[in-house]
Image (cartoon, rainbow, N blue to C red):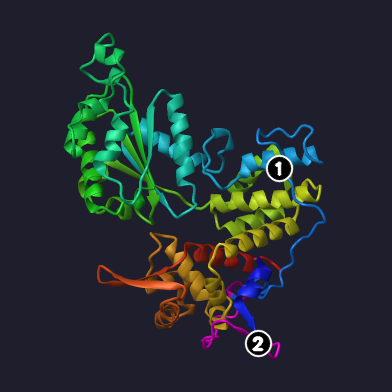
């Protein structure tokens, strides 16, 4: 990939010299000069095409069969088994679903169970991207089903409609649990569900609360995951009204909402009438002992050992994100297994970071890679990183003051504003928009923010 990028970003001239496809923009004055503010040299070598790639004389092969059976398959079945076990324990491409693979969030799970079981309230789980909200929701659902709760899961989309989502939920609640139905009635025998009692066409929170107030014989939990993706204000208003109605009628149905937000109001709006019916559960970053517990899953599954130095490095690089802890732990473990090592050291962790940065960089358009490699991007690296961090707290949009809050007083608000506008022209890194009278910015490609944040973590590592 790096050599391809070198070819893409430069064109040969007749005098055998090269020049960039896009002219270098004038550099702004550098901001800050501490190691943590500098762009890691690894990125520069990647963009120049200097990064080395391991080469072998044989073509790559799968290490296991599609059935995950490695017996008699491949040249190193022991290593293959360790890789599969490590993937199952620390794989980061999907949320954690199985309870045995869940770690580091026991306190949050206990709070969620307490709110549902003892307080009988509705719960809003909120926090930054990759902080473990969906994994918590899945493991909680498994735990609740073990206690005979009827748990229904729904993932929200930008075009979601209130009646569509709640009709789907109702279609999964058997009529056996309706107050008016006896176990021997025909409705039970024909397997009818609650949706058969809803009106045709559209309906609102009143009809849903009337229906759900008649649930008996069980308790129902409705999980609305990624609730922040709902953009329709009417949908959110209807959900708030439904929460109030269900609470007022002591219905045996409770809602659990999850979404990206820095506070409760970002998800449910300012709705004082339902505050006493809701518990907010903020998802905080993992601390070092929790990071160690998550990595311990990989140790136990694959027979590996993460040194204390590696645990510290991964905790630093992940900034408390369970997703990044798993991603980096998985990559570091693979690096060790490929060397026939069971002890994971700092070189394996650094390899993991560089592999992740390389993969993320490869997903960006080459034009964006070229912009990031420019001298003016290097001089403004702290502002770009601060903007990426500010955009993690909401839907990607951030203001100048948000970036200033991330960077502190080392850089003035006016300097930040000037830097952001420098990269907000058409074809640049950032887009800008007026939202409710406030000027806001957002990275055009989410992968840019991820790369910037990981680069900042890499810069914090000891040389």
Q: Residue at x 64, y 45 (%)?
A: 295
The percent coordinates of residue 111 (x first, y second) are: 43, 39
Residue 300 seen: no
Q: Residue at x 46, y 37 (%)?
A: 138
- Dividing the picture into quarters, in which one does residue 439 lie? bottom left
Residue 15 part of the magenta segment: yes
Q: Along the horizontal axis of the image, is 74 left or right of 84? A: right
User: CA gap, disc 2 to disc 1?
Assistant: 47 Å
Residue farthest top in this picture: 184
Q: Secondary structure at mark 2?
A: loop
Q: Residue at x 73, y 52 (%)?
A: 335
Q: Secondary structure at mark 1?
A: helix
- According to the picture, the residue beneath numbered tag 2 turns out to be 13
- Extent of the magenta region: 14-37
Q: Quadrant of the N terminus?
A: bottom right
- According to the picture, the residue beneath numbered tag 1 turns out to be 83
Q: Earlier in the sequence, mark 2 or mark 1?
A: 2
Q: Nearer the viewer, mark 2 or mark 1?
A: 2
Residue 372 part of the magenta segment: no
The percent coordinates of residue 227 (x first, y second) are: 35, 48
- Dividing the picture into quarters, in which one does residue 320 lie? bottom right
Q: Quadrant of the C terminus?
A: bottom right
Between 208 and 196, the one nearer to me in the picture: 196
């Amino acid at each position: 990939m790096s050599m391809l990028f070198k070819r893409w970003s430069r064109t040969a001239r007749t005098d055998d010299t090269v020049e960039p496809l896009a002219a270098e923009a004038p550099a702004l004055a550098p901001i800050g000069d501490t190691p943590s503010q500098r762009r890691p040299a690894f990125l520069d070598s990647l963009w120049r095409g200097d990064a080395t790639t391991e080469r072998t004389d044989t073509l790559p092969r799968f290490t296991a069969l599609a059935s995950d059976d490695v017996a008699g398959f491949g040249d190193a079945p022991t290593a293959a088994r360790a890789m599969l076990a490590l993937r199952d324990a620390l794989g980061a491409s999907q949320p954690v679903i199985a309870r045995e693979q869940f770690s580091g969030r026991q306190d949050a799970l206990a709070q969620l169970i307490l709110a549902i079981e003892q307080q009988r309230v509705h719960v809003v789980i909120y926090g930054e991207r990759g902080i473990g909200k969906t994994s918590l929701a899945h493991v909680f659902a498994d735990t609740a089903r073990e206690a005979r709760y009827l748990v229904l899961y729904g993932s929200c989309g930008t075009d979601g409609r209130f009646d569509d989502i709640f009709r789907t939920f109702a279609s999964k609640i058997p009529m056996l649990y309706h107050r008016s139905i006896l176990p021997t009635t025909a409705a039970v025998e024909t397997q009818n569900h609650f949706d058969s009692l809803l009106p045709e066409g559209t309906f609102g929170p009143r009809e849903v609360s009337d229906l759900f107030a008649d649930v008996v014989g069980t308790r129902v939990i409705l999980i609305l995951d990624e609730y922040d993706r709902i953009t329709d204000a009417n949908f959110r208003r209807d959900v708030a009204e439904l929460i109030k109605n269900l609470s007022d009628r002591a219905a045996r149905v409770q809602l659990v909402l999850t979404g990206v937000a820095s506070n409760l109001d970002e998800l449910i709006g300012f709705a004082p009438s339902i505050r006493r019916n809701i518990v907010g559960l903020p998802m905080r970053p993992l601390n070092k002992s929790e990071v160690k517990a998550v990595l311990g899953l990989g140790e136990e599954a694959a027979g590996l050992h993460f040194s204390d130095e590696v645990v510290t490095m991964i905790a630093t690089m992940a900034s408390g994100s369970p997703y990044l802890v798993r991603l980096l732990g998985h990559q570091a473990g693979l690096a060790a297994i490929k060397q026939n090592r069971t002890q994971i050291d700092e070189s394996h962790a650094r390899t993991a970071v560089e592999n992740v940065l390389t993969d993320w960089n490869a997903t960006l358009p080459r034009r964006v890679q070229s912009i990031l490699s420019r001298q003016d991007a290097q001089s403004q690296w702290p502002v770009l990183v601060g903007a990426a961090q500010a955009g993690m707290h909401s839907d990607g949009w951030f203001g100048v003051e948000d970036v200033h809050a991330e960077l502190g007083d080392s850089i003035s608000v006016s300097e930040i504003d000037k830097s952001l506008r420098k990269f907000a022209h058409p074809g640049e890194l950032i887009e800008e928009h007026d939202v409710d009278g406030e000027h806001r910015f957002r990275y055009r490609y989410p992968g840019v923010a991820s790369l910037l944040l990981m680069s900042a973590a890499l810069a914090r590592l000891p040389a």
